[in-house]
Image (cartoon, helix red, strand yellow):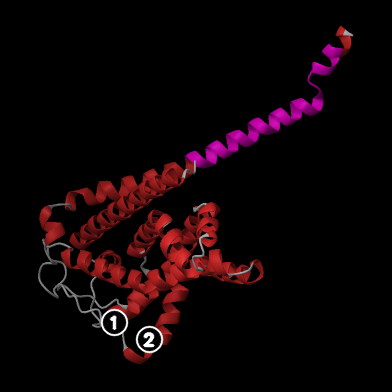
Amino acid sequence: MANQVGAVLTPGPGLRRRRRTDRLMRASATAAAMLAVAILAIMVGSVAVHGASQLSISFLTENPAGGSLVGLAGGGIANAIIGSALLVAVATAMALPMGVLIAIYLTELSTPRTARPVRLALDLLNGLPTIVTGIFVFGLLVASHGQSGIAASFALAVVILPVITRTTQEMLLLVPRDLRDAAHALGISRWRTITSVVLPGALGGILTGVVLALARAAGETAPLLLTSSIFSSHTTLNVFGAAIPNIPIDIFSYSESPFPVEHAKAWGAALVLIVLILVGNLTARALLARQRRRLGVL
């Protein structure tokens, strides 16, 4: 009997092969994860090394030096920071209401048969190259009315709409079903339940989706090249005008310049953009963790 038990517990060729395969896959997955982190670290480190020398109070608070002249030292990207914030704010104002309404439809009102094509459309829109979005908006608005901040904001709104929608949808699904059932048992209408129970419970997650969308919109360049790429050295709050300075276009313009001083400005602007996106993503993660703790989700 003891010999039979020992024979059963002895690893066979199949078990040893599975163990080797398991170790190989673990090592491959670990190496892939480390490679991804290393690439990100190299990229961020390179931008930080080249752009750190440009960072200063004046770089963040002053407009480009020399007006329309190029190749001049000094000045900063204050107008681009304000312009980017303005474009992203208008884009969020366009996309947020629609994104929340679509998420409510998918989670509270639709049937599985009708929700499936909507989710598919959102996934395809999320994976669509942003240059295609830029071309679409160019043909829709720019070709007939010229470049403008509104066209740029609309393009960014199309880009961030699926991000807001899918994040809001996931947060609405985290709201316990018991809360909905209790509201219905009290005779509260469906829309009153949604606005008074479901949405307040998912508010933190919705804010998370908005912050993630802001971080993505702030770094988009392709749609802006086709909708609002006229260089301006002045600060403007007129979203209907053509010259809305923004950080991605500044980076592109400075990097294409033949002057080394403007190459340095491009590195500095890139570092500022990375920091802004990093802060946005960290804020979104903190809000998401807080929302999950609030709803009791691990």
Magenta residue check for 31 = yes
Q: Which of the 4 image quadrants contains residue 149?
A: bottom left
Foreground residue among 141 and 254: 141
In this figure, which residue is indicated by the disc labeled 1? 148
x 20%, y 67%: residue: 82
Give me the C-alpha separation between circle 2 and circle 1.
9 Å
Quadrant for the N terminus in the image: top right
Density class for disc 2 (Cα within 10 Å; few <14, some 14-19, many ≥20) is some
Examine the rendering and report whether any part of residue 91 can be seen. Answer: yes
| Percent x, y of residue 28 | 59, 38
Which mark identifies residue 171? none
In this figure, which residue is indicated by the disc labeled 2? 141
Helix, strand or loop under label 2: helix
Q: Relative to 202, is 86 on the left or the right?
A: left
Magenta residue check for 69 = no
Check contact, mark 2 vs mark 1: CB within 8 A: yes
Examine the rendering and report whether any part of residue 129 can be seen. Answer: no
Helix, strand or loop under label 1: loop
- The correct choice, above or below, for 37 with respect to 170 in the image is above
x 52%, y 56%: residue: 182
Density class for disc 1 (Cα within 10 Å; few <14, some 14-19, many ≥20) is many
- The correct choice, above or below, for 276 with respect to 130 in the image is above
Provide the residue span drawn in magenta: 5-34
Q: Relative to 128, is 238 on the left or the right?
A: left
| Percent x, y of residue 27 | 59, 34
As shown in the figure, which amino acid type bears the numbered disc 1? Answer: Ser
Main SS, magenta region, reads helix
Foreground residue among 170 and 236: 170
Q: Name, please, the residue furthest toward the top.
A: 2
| Percent x, y of residue 18 | 73, 31
Nearer-N-terminus badge (2/1): 2
